[in-house]
Amino acid sequence: GSRSNAQKIPRYMRVNLLKSSVQTVIEDLKEEGWDYIGKLSTDSFKDSALALSEGQFGLDPFLHDVLVFAVNTDLHVHPLTVSGVLVQQDRASCVPAHVLAAPEGSVVLDCCAAPGNKTTHLASLMGDKGQVIALDRDQKRLSTLTEMVARSGATSVNPIHQDFLTVQPGSEDAKGIQMVLVDPSCSGSGMRQQIGDGDTDDALRKRLQTLKRFQISILKHALRFPDVQRVVYSTCSVHTEENEEVVTEVMAHVSEYFQFESVFPQWTGSRGLVGFPDSPCFLRLKPETDLTQGFFVACFQRVKRKQNPEA
Ligand code: SAM
């Protein structure tokens, strides 16, 4: 659609819990004259978020470290942003780290990590205790991640320039990794501006098949790690090829060992597409209902350990 028809999206700011707390930030902002309206309700999220006027803000009903400001609020030169306390991040992009829910002290792998929005969020939620291994195969993007990690104040992040598919699940490096965040390259069709916007339908379908094969190979690889208990898969794509089709095909291979865990079950109305039996477990976020970019999240939870991980 044309830009004027595009859904208006509030401004979301995540609190970096390594530098402050949500309560402190709320107090700081109130002292500056901002009007805090409290936690937004799950039922009327859209209406109340869009009703925020300039100078007002609220707390996300599902994401306890995400503040919601009026559309077009500009905080990028605010001292709390400059000092790394507030991080501008889309609401949907804040979901995967919450779903992974890594306890303090966990060893977590972010296998497609750059530029590091979700890596730094993981470290924040883990209180910088434990380890976040952040892989990316693109050196330039990894240096952006390294800068972002430095700004966040996290010391538990270990950025590594490596192709995830070359990490052997049976190796010493893979041992002890308990959770993996899989946020692979995708079409980006859930974002407002995207590459390949002018593709013909044929070219698009072909490109989606290539992406799907790549995404399946990355996700399957993550599920081969012997100590992994939990894997969260996410994309900023709206295409079923990159979302329900990927996780359904992968689950068919690992269902003896993993089950889908329902992602934010109380987040009603934003589940996977009909036609996939496990869709009630998936979260599929949309601008029109969730005031986010188009986004997809699924969670694999181990139910049985492999006796012989090398097999
Ligand atoms: N998670 C990031 C964030 O929240 O900031 C965004 C990740 S982006 C969607 C996908 C990333 O995966 C890209 O930076 C790309 O270089 C990386 N990537 C793609 N294939 C990879 C592979 N085989 N191994 C490691 N990284 C890979």
Image (cartoon, rainbow, N blue to C red):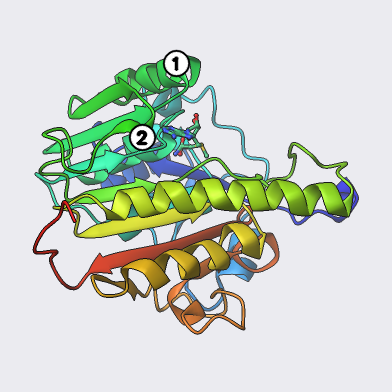
Is label 2 or label 1 in front? 2
Q: Which three-letter amino acid code belongs to the residue tagged 1?
A: Gln
Whether the residue carrying mark 2 lies under 8 Å from ligand 1 is answered with yes
Looking at the figure, which quarter contains the N terminus?
Answer: bottom right
Q: Position of residue 55 (x, y in %)?
A: 57, 44
Return the residue at label 1: 139
Q: Residue at the location (47% across, 71% down)?
A: 282
Q: Secondary structure at mark 2?
A: helix
**Within 10 Å of the Cα at label 1, are there few (<14), some (14-19), or many (20+) other Cα atoms?**
some
- Residue drawn at x 47%, y 42% is 13
Q: Amino acid at mark 2?
A: Phe
Residue designated by label 2? 164
Secondary structure of residue under mark 1: helix
Indicate the position of residue 268 as horizontal and vertical percent values. Answer: 50, 80
Front position in the image: 298 or 216: 216
Specify few, some or many for label 2: CA neighbours under 10 Å numbering under 14, 14-19, or 20 or more: some
Name the image quarter holding residue 151.
top left
- Please name the residue shown 66% across and 45% down the image: 187
